[in-house]
């Protein structure tokens, strides 16, 4: 599943590749994604120019002059720019054809992705309203994390994976950030000290930024994400040794997600 770094890398790729292109037509082959593709999309996008590509959490936001195209990649969604026409495959659900002949193609084998359209202010859109601060901006800080955790007894890992608290911290990055911060994932959020919150806010930012910098790759063919192998201390290492103390890592389920931590280094 693409997480925030992969979505940010997609945003940068699209920003470079499609900004300034003008839409000639939209072809919707499979309108039933996680939400129905809006029927007015074809009409709304025709003749419009892509002015910018932005991101909010794991949503890609394409500024199309008259409104915003909101895209979520879901579990297996991928946006590919084709420079020459190619016959669509089974999972190629939506094409945005540009006047220069290139095509932005949405491919999604599992159809958990979303394509929405709004002419309203983005913050008012039901998919985006209520998303917490972006972890890579100053709005997300230790002081903020301390404030919002005071009354919450939920496990700290689940708190930081809650999109209403902070945007786009998925399972893998939550595990990594907690390991680096030396905090057990199952600690009650309200038990974190101010210092621990400061440390956690820093490590969340670090793991996301490093993954972006290392260029985590999301491959369309397999619909899978290939992470940089050196980027993780605990992800996928449930039966391995702690990179810090050499002891055995523990793997548990938390909120039905795999959770790996070091019982010695994380308290
Ligand atoms: Zn350890």
Image (cartoon, rainbow, N blue to C red):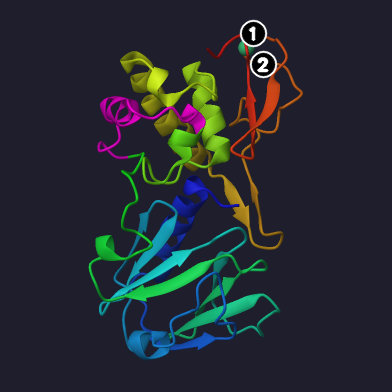
Q: Is residue 144 magenta?
A: yes
User: Residue at 70% of width from left, 10% of height from top?
Assistant: 247
Q: Which residue is mark 1?
A: 245
Residue 99 can be seen in this image:
no
User: Residue at 61% of width from left, 25% of height from top?
Assistant: 233
Q: Which mark is residue 242?
A: 2
Tell me the crowding category of disc 2: few under 14, some 14 to 19, or many 20 or more residues within 10 angstroms, Cα based.
many
x then y, percent, for residue 200 = 41, 24
Confirm or reject: label 1 Cβ below 8 Å from ligand 1.
yes
Asked if residue 72 is positioned above or below residue 140 in the image, the reply reads below
Using residue 97 as the reference point, say whether residue 87 is left or right of it.
Answer: right
Q: Is residue 35 magenta?
A: no
Asked if residue 71 is positioned above or below residue 264 in the image, the reply reads below
Asked if residue 227 is positioned above or below residue 6 in the image, the reply reads above
Residue 15 can be seen in this image:
yes
Q: Which residues are magenta?
A: 137-157
Number of numbered markers: 2
Using residue 139 as the reference point, say whether residue 117 is left or right of it.
Answer: right
User: Residue at 64% of width from left, 40% of height from top?
Assistant: 256
> What kind of element bears circle 1?
loop
Residue situated in front as seen by the camera: 238 or 60: 238
Confirm or reject: label 2 Cβ below 8 Å from ligand 1.
yes
Residue situated in front as seen by the camera: 4 or 82: 4
Give me the C-alpha separation between circle 2 and circle 1: 6 Å
Q: Are marks 2 and 1 in contact (CB under 8 Å)?
A: yes
Q: Which mark is residue 156?
A: none
> What kind of element bears circle 2?
loop
Tell me the crowding category of disc 1: few under 14, some 14 to 19, or many 20 or more residues within 10 angstroms, Cα based.
few
Q: Tell me where residue 145 sits by quadrant.
A: top left
Report ligand 1 position as a quadrant: top right
């Amino acid at each position: 599943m693409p997480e925030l770094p992969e979505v940010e890398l997609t945003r940068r790729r699209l920003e470079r590749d499609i900004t300034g292109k003008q839409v000639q037509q939209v072809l919707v082959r499979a309108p039933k994604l996680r939400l129905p593709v809006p029927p007015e999309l074809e009409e709304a996008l025709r003749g419009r120019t892509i002015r910018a590509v932005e991101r909010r959490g794991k949503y890609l936001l394409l500024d199309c002059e008259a409104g915003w195209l909101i895209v979520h990649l879901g579990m297996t969604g991928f946006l590919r720019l084709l420079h020459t026409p190619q016959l669509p495959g089974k999972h190629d659900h939506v094409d945005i054809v540009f006047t220069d002949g290139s095509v932005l193609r949405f491919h999604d084998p599992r159809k958990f992705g979303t394509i929405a359209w709004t002419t309203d202010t983005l913050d008012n859109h039901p998919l985006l309203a209520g998303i917490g601060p972006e972890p890579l901006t100053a709005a997300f800080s230790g002081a903020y994390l301390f404030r919002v955790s005071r009354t919450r007894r939920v496990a700290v890992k689940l708190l930081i994976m809650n999109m209403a608290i902070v945007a786009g911290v998925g399972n893998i990055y939550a595990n990594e950030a907690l390991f680096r911060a030396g905090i057990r994932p199952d600690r009650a959020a309200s038990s974190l000290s101010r210092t621990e919150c400061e440390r956690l806010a820093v490590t969340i930012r670090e793991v996301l930024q490093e993954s972006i910098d290392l260029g985590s790759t999301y491959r369309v063919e397999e619909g899978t994400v290939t992470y940089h192998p050196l980027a993780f201390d605990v992800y996928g290492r449930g039966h391995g040794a702690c990179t810090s103390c050499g002891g055995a890592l523990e793997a548990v389920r938390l909120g039905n997600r795999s959770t790996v931590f070091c019982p010695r280094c994380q308290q």
